[in-house]
Image: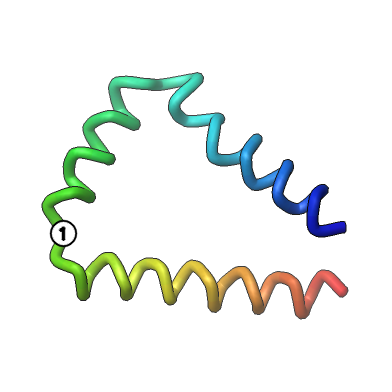
Amino acid sequence: MFLMAFALMLVIEGVLPFLIPSVWREAFRRITQFTDGQIRFFGLSSMLLGLVLLYFAS
């Protein structure tokens, strides 16, 4: 199950660089300019959203 979830994450993460690499590059450049606190906030928000989705999906 974990391997399937990891594989799905890789597929989803690869969609933007494959379809619109210039937009992905610009977004990544902007992210590198965020402070550590901002990056941590987005990481925490992403984890919490994922947990909520897992809860409702099961």
Horizontal placement of 27 versus 50: left or right? left
Identify the residue at horizontal 65%, vertical 76% (top origin).
51
Quick check: 46 above or below 20? below
- The number of callouts visible is 1
Identify the residue at horizontal 12%, vertical 52% (top origin).
33
Amino acid type at mark 1 = Phe
User: Pointer 1: residues within 10 angstroms few (<14), some, or many (20+)?
Assistant: few
| Residue 46 position within the rendered picture, expressed as x and y whole percent measured from the top left | 49, 67
Quick check: 16 above or below 50? above
Identify the image quadrant of residue 2. Answer: bottom right
Identify the image quadrant of residue 25. Answer: top left
Q: Which residue matches tag 1? A: 34
| Residue 48 position within the rendered picture, expressed as x and y whole percent measured from the top left | 54, 78
| Residue 47 position within the rendered picture, expressed as x and y whole percent measured from the top left | 53, 72
Quadrant that contains the N terminus:
bottom right
| Residue 56 position within the rendered picture, expressed as x and y whole percent measured from the top left | 78, 77
Quadrant that contains the C terminus:
bottom right
